[in-house]
Amino acid sequence: MAIDKFVVENYPIKMDCSTCPDTLVLVAAKIEEGFNMPSLARIEFLADNAKIDLDDLMGQKVELITKVPDGPKRLEAGERDRKHIGICTSVRFVGQYDGMAHYWAEIRPRLWFLTLNQDCRIFQEKTAADIIKEVLGEYGINFEDKFTETYRTRIICVQYRETDLAFVHRLMEEEGMHYFFTYDGSEEKMVLHDDSAAHETVPCENTIEFRDLVDSPRRDIEHFFQWHADHTATTGKYTHTDYNFEKPKAKLETLKTMPKGKHTLKDREIYDYPGHYRETSDGDHYAKVKMEERSIRYKTWKGAGLVSNVEVGKTFKVSKHPSTSDSEEFVVRAATHLFQLNQRELSALEVTRFPSGSVRAEMDEEDPYQVHVTAIPKMEKFRPAPVTPWPEIAGCHTAVVTGPSGEEIHTDKYGRIRIQFHWDRLGKKDEHSTCWVRCMMPWTGKNWGMIALPRVGQEVVVSFEEGDPDRPLIIGMLYNADTMPPYGLPENKTQSGVKTRSSKEGSSSNFNELRFEDKKGQEEIYFHAEKDYNQVVENNATVKIGFDDKDKGDLTQEIYHDKTEEVGNDLKVKVGYGEGGKSPGDMKHEVYNNRTEVIGNSFKVNVEKGNHDTTVEKGNQSNKVSMGNMTNEVSMGNFTETIKMGNHTTKVNLGKTEHEAMQSIELKVGSNSIKIDQRGITIKGLMVTVKGDVMLTAKSPVTTVKGDALLILKGGLTTIN
């Protein structure tokens, strides 16, 4: 029979799409759906010829509609047709059989197209629920948010070389979320869920009768002909822990126990690290999710039958089963629907053969439809199994240090920095490129250790804790063509050291540096302070210069402005004293302007051998003792004071002056002199004047007054006795 003469109204299933010819006949379909999986419909259809342009079908929306079969049933015909909506993602011409062109196709929901997009990107300060909804929104997916739990805000969440669907699945598995699809009207809808107890019942009659295979007839009523529970031994305790560097002493271990069964091995424990959390409250949540996921494995119900109204995510009851209470409710977590034209309908089409691999091979020829169901008790918390691979980063990456515009060093109190990975095409290379990232230092302690912060624009090496993209660590830095080494290579390959750059806006001439030159014969340690240099030695300091080679060893100090030395106790300077003993050595102080010495107690200059010369080329010399004595002593030798030009004044404001000599004291001006010696006092001068304003007395046992030419004695009253 030609397809165009086949009575369409009698189809138990049909396919509807905008580009499908009216003469297509859908002969079989297998629809697989479940929690956290894009549904898949494999369909088989016939055409009069093989001239269908398959390109027209690819990417088109396809509706699969299954009608309730004839006969007594719990649903009235047409009351609720089973509808599955998706997009054609695969189609092929299988071959010619019985004069008919056979085609196979696959229909998937719009969500499946997230498997075709792989990305590397960073989300910050968002919950898993926020991220999931954002990704779904990018594809225009129609979804309904039925999340009931509150989820932690993630400082960073990285999608790394994952398809968008794998990324969404991984987050949902980690948080214990699930989704499924409903088909109301002409659109598919993705329902986001995290609470099995809140699921709705199946449409219309929600109690499905169980009838054993031996019962007959089988096809007169919707029922399960298989219904049983699978028991699997599971872990009864889940424990994990983690580490929070901001609370390094905090005990973050959390656990959840949920033993199932009566056997003695039900308390087996899983202990894991890291738990991917920083707070114990989050650890409690994730331990609960992990334990509930394992607990649900203990008892899973499976069934098969002729039931058209079973939908994933809906609840139902089973009646008349020997091991199931009629009042117990179950949630459909997975279902496989099988539809086909029966033998009578195929005979009308004069089709007797089908290609190998046909969906029809999985069904009884007389069954127009079947459903295979996996269910869990409604009161059990469903959590998806962690089947999506974690995007582990086994090696290191490099990245560029980022920060706000105009900043050269961007950090926080922990010395963390922000970076942008080379694969991050969405980052703006600013302070929002990533979260704060910790930097490894060669040596750390409590307020001590080593620190050198990477600066904006520099390239750093990034490792990841346990390969986790959400936990980057800076473990080093690299030179590149934009940031070259401080010493030209390879010509300066013997040089090593530390050279910094002044910030902000420092140039190549603004730096601090400690450099080591290891070239044989030219060894050098070079130190440069761009501004101030402060050295603190809490006990002793020793500097030896030139002693190893016993050769020339000089120390030169050049100070542009002032030098201040403060010595808490003694200062001792020895010149000419080497390790081998005394050797010729001079000490010379040159002061361009003034020199002032202030001594709190005593000042002693001891010249053991040689001369002590003090010369003032131009200016004055002043010796002042404010309180105390001043003594000049020559043990052996002469003491000479010579004033070549100028005066000599000795003034005693309060007290007396004494001059004492063993031989003589002589005051001399030209040919005039006063001499005091052992014999007496001799006054000699061209003219000698002795004047007493009040009285003059000269007295001795023998007194001689003699004038070789003239003697004049004159007074107001003169007495000679």
Image (spheres, rainbow, N blue to C red):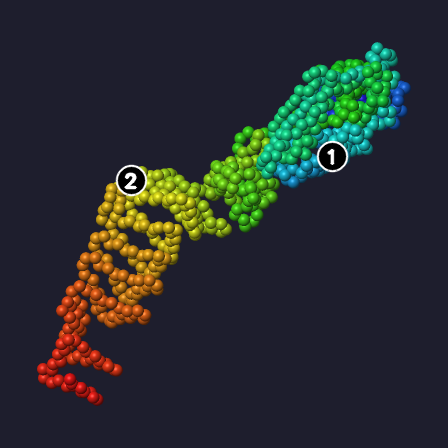
- 655 vs 28, left or right, is left
User: Can you tell which quarter of the image residue 489 is in?
Assistant: top left
- Report the mark closest to the observer, 2 or 1: 2
- 549 vs 120, left or right, is left
Residue 340 image point, x, y percent: 79, 19
The residue located at (81%, 32%) in the rendering is 184
Image quarter (top left, top right, bottom left or bottom right) of the C terminus: bottom left
User: Can you tell which quarter of the image residue 152 is in?
Assistant: top right
The residue located at (32%, 71%) in the rendering is 653
Closer to the camera in the image, 336 or 244: 244
Give residue 609's mark: none
Closer to the camera in the image, 388 or 626: 626
Residue 173 image point, x, y percent: 68, 29
Q: Amino acid at mark 1?
A: Glu
Q: Does residue 47 show up? A: no
Q: Earlier in the sequence, mark 2 or mark 1?
A: 1
- 336 vs 115, left or right, is right
Q: Residue furthest top?
A: 214
Q: Does residue 305 show up? A: yes
Q: Amino acid at mark 2?
A: Asp
* Residue that label 2 marks: 548
Image quarter (top left, top right, bottom left or bottom right) of the N terminus: top right
Q: Residue furthest front?
A: 721
Residue 479 image point, x, y percent: 46, 40
* Residue that label 1 marks: 149
Closer to the camera in the image, 14 or 279: 279
The residue located at (17%, 70%) in the rendering is 676
